[in-house]
């Protein structure tokens, strides 16, 4: 039976789902896109906190000959599939493309679930084979999900979906112990496990039988196509050869997933996994069917164009596309399952003829509203709360961070509402009023101007991420604090005096071998040397290493004396001690719409602490592009101008100055601080006015290139200098900057600091903060080496443009740019293509970059001149 729920926006269903969800059965919510899935999951975690929520990311068909996906997405899908097999009482949220994707039959998938039980025997050869087929990578030391290692009678596995890897101790073929362990220290964690099930880490599992079937099926289909007198026989034969090679090498899984019907005659979908007899009470909710059908129509059109192009070029045959779903509408796809709910928005009621559904048994109608936006006006908040209470509403304010609870509690006490209005910590996409249920949830973002969603964090006050050891691979050179340089040969399990332990094995000169207990690995670091020559391995029988350490220590003391002398003058000067944080500072930071990383928070705390001391600050903030260095500096700038001081932001390019200006202007717009920029885009008259106001103190924040260090620039009371990418300034500019830095606080931002600056930071003369943690949901950079073909170039660029993206094409030499540009224009005549390189002149190049940033250029072909730390939206 199909039921329809009306009156709700698709995200709002989470607030009322408890009315119709089975208590101990799973439910699938089908949405139009992955961002929508994430929003829905956020609200479900609030309204139904006892339910596990899984997101199944979507993956578009991609018929290119290289791997181009995030393993995180694959693992997320595998974790959700494992939950379905276990028939867990959970909520699954999936974009329609994820639901339509063909996957291997559930019986075949389940056969590669590996079980371990304490004191039970296992077939170790079978376990090894299943781990390989299930997508687990064999390594010498397990560090990441999807890895396994076998050392003697110890089997380490990091199953997908687990927070920690597990260590299985074997006695011959019997499982003695199952325990979790720390992947960094390799030490066991408290508590043992009696039973363990390891689920696959891939969606397509290729064993010998399925590989044989796939190769035979592909060979027969392609041979038949070539026998039909196809003019593209040569291209088809090359494609056949490539596919067979991928299957033999178990390579390029993303491509092979599109050929799943060759591996399994009857592939299935997530729906088949969900509606097994074991989970027959599961419900399916289709949220906003009209929008989902629009997504399906667009996908079908794009895929048809892809397939047609591949057929015309001899890169595919018609049989290759059988794994693509035949359903043209979401209703056709789900008609096989009668326990289906449609959730339609109010504005599509007539399309689905549901205007009379409120009188029918197969329809449920809700009356919901969005609370008004209060934009920080607490008087409006008071009026709204009293109105809801007078109307008999159960009223709840939802806040994201603990510090908000105190301020909201004080507000309710002052207004006589404490005890009448509930406060609850959590996160919502937006507030909701359930009119017919007499409930309202006011979300922090509706009350204040902006908001951020907080994640639960693990305290890291007394910890520091260990990196060098986890980077060590067998064969790397390492340095032992006492014994010197040796070659790391892996981890061995040895029994010494009746005690079995893990040891690092390190080879030294001659036949000397040193075994270091894992619990003493802090004495060992990875060797990092200069130049291309291999280091000389130390000899354990001589004192050469001891003399080397003494010499280095002496040289280090001399260098330290020189560096300290250089900074002594600065440190002896009396600086300005800024005031502690104000209410404005707190509000300004809360207005940041994203979640700060732990590294950002540490850097911000360091900057504030330094600024409040009466000694000039000189702090280096080092982090990759896009990791949030600008926001860190902006907190310091706001603290500076709040104390009536001026702040200057020095950047290497006009474009970057313009981008910083827009960012600062947007963040500072609600406060009485004036932000200006000096660049060539300002007229001479405008520049004169800004310089005059800067001297008079009418400008609080000034942003510009080396123009800021010109002789005619005078500051009324400069308190903070922010230098972005110092290494891109010339020698003459750096000398001028040095004079500016004598008695003001300085923050230097850089992804690649100059050696001297880095050296001073490392030895402690100059303070430094590293921002190494990427922002939430940031995709890692993925690099692939692929054949240089027009097909791959054209297809990759076209896909990016069709999703409203932009493309950089980096060419190593100017002489090759014209040829690449002509090729791309021929492949994609509809694309807006531009060329940029150093010979164009500063202004022309900046104009091109600005057009690219403004979205007026689809493809920018350039040399490495583009690496200037720009923010490309």
Image: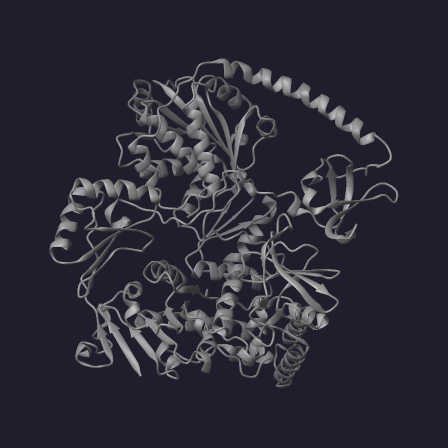
* Residue 136 pos. (x, y %): 63, 64
Residue 228 to residue 871: above or below? below
Q: Total label count? A: 0
Q: Is residue 699 visible?
A: yes
Residue 208 figure quarter: bottom right
| Towards the viewer: 190 or 114 | 190
Residue located at (14% from left, 58% from top): 392
Instruction: Name the side, left or right, on which 404 lies relative to 747.
Output: left
Task: Identify whether 786 is placed above or below 772.
Answer: below
Position of 94 with respect to 440 (left or right) is: right
Quadrant (top left, top right, bottom left, bottom right) of the N terminus: bottom left
Q: Is residue 808 above or below residue 257?
A: above
Residue 181 pos. (x, y %) = 61, 54
Which of these two is toward me, 805 or 831?
Answer: 805
* Residue at the far right in the pictured view: 510
Whether 49 is drawn above or below 453: the answer is below
Decide if residue 759 is on the left or right side of residue 510: left
């Amino acid at each position: 039976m199909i039921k329809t729920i009306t009156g709700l926006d698709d995200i709002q269903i989470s607030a009322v789902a408890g009315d119709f969800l089975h208590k101990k059965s799973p439910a699938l919510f089908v949405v139009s896109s992955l961002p929508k899935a994430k929003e829905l999951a956020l609200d479900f975690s609030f309204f139904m906190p006892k339910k596990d929520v899984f997101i199944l990311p979507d993956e578009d068909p991609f018929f290119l000959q290289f791997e181009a996906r995030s393993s995180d997405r694959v693992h997320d899908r595998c974790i959700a599939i494992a939950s379905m097999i276990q028939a867990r009482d959970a909520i699954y949220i999936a974009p329609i493309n994820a639901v339509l994707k063909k996957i291997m039959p559930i019986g075949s998938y389940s056969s590669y679930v590996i079980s371990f039980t304490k004191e039970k025997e296992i077939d170790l050869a079978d376990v090894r084979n299943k781990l390989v087929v299930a997508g687990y990578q064999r390594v010498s030391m397990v560090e990441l999900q999807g890895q396994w290692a076998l050392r003697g009678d110890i089997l380490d596995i990091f199953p997908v979906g687990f927070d920690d890897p597990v260590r299985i101790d074997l006695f011959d073929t019997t499982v003695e112990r199952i325990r979790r362990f720390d992947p960094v220290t390799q030490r066991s964690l408290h508590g043992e496990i009696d039973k363990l099930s390891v689920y696959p880490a891939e969606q397509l599992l290729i064993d010998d039988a399925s590989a044989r079937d796939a190769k035979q099926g592909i060979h027969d289909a392609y041979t038949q196509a070539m026998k039909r007198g196809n003019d593209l026989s040569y291209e088809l034969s090359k494609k056949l050869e490539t596919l067979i090679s991928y299957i033999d090498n178990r390579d390029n899984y993303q491509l092979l997933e599109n050929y799943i019907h060759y591996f399994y005659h009857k592939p299935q979908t997530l729906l088949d996994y969900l509606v097994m007899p074991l989970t027959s009470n599961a419900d399916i909710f289709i949220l906003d069917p009209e929008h989902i059908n629009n997504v399906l129509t667009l996908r079908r059109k794009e895929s048809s164009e892809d397939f047609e192009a591949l057929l015309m070029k001899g890169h595919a045959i018609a049989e290759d596309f059988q794994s693509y779903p035949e359903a043209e509408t979401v209703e056709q796809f789900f008609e096989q399952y009668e326990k289906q709910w449609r959730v339609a928005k109010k504005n599509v009621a007539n399309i689905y003829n549901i205007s009379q559904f409120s009188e029918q048994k197969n329809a449920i109608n809700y009356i919901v509203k969005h609370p008004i936006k209060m934009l920080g006006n607490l008087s409006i908040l008071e009026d709204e709360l009293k109105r809801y209470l007078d109307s008999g509403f159960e009223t709840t304010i939802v806040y994201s961070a603990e510090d908000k609870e105190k301020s909201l509690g004080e507000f309710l006490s002052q207004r006589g509402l404490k005890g009448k209005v509930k406060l609850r910590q959590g996160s919502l996409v937006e507030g909701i009023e359930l009119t017919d249920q007499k409930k309202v949830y006011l979300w922090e973002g509706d009350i204040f101007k902006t908001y951020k969603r907080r994640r639960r964090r693990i305290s890291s006050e007394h910890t520091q991420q260990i990196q060098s050891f986890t980077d060590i691979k067998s064969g790397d050179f390492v340095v032992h604090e006492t014994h010197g340089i040796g070659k790391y040969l892996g981890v061995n399990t040895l029994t010494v005096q009746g005690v079995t332990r893990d040891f690092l094995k390190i080879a030294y000169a001659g036949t000397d071998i040193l075994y270091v207990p894992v619990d003493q690995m802090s004495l060992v670091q990875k060797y990092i040397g200069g130049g291309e020559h291999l280091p000389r391995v130390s000899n354990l029988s001589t004192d050469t290493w001891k003399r080397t350490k003494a010499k280095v220590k002496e040289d280090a003391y001399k260098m330290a004396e020189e560096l300290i002398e250089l900074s002594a003058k600065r440190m002896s000067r009396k600086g300005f001690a800024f005031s502690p944080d104000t209410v404005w500072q707190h509000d300004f930071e809360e207005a940041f719409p994203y979640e700060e990383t732990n590294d950002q928070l540490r850097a911000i705390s360091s900057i504030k602490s330094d600024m409040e001391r009466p000694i000039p600050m000189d702090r280096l903030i080092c982090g990759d592009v896009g990791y949030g260095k600008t926001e860190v500096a902006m907190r310091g700038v706001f603290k500076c101008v709040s104390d009536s001081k001026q702040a200057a932001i020095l950047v290497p390019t006009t474009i970057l100055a313009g981008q910083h200006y827009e960012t600062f202007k947007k963040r500072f717009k609600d406060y009485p601080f004036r932000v200006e920029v000096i660049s060539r885009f300002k007229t001479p008259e405008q520049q004169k006015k800004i310089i005059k106001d800067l001297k008079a103190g009418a400008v609080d924040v000034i942003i510009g290139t080396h123009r800021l260090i010109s002789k005619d620039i005078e500051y009324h009371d400069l308190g903070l200098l922010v230098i972005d990418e110092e290494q891109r300034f010339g020698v003459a500019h750096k000398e001028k900057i040095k004079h500016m830095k004598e008695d003001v606080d300085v923050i230097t931002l850089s992804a690649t600091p100059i050696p001297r600056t880095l050296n001073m930071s490392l030895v402690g003369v100059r303070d430094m903060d590293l921002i190494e943690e990427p922002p939430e949901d940031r995709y890692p950079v993925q690099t692939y080496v692929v054949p240089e073909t027009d097909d791959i170039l054209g297809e990759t660029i076209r896909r990016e443009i069709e999703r409203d993206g932009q493309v950089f094409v980096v060419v190593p030499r100017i002489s090759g740019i014209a040829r690449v540009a002509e090729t791309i224009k021929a492949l994609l005549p509809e694309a807006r293509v531009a060329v940029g390189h150093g010979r164009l002149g500063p202004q022309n190049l900046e104009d091109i970059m600005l057009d690219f940033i403004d979205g007026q250029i689809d493809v920018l072909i350039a040399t490495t001149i583009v690496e200037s730390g720009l923010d490309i939206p």
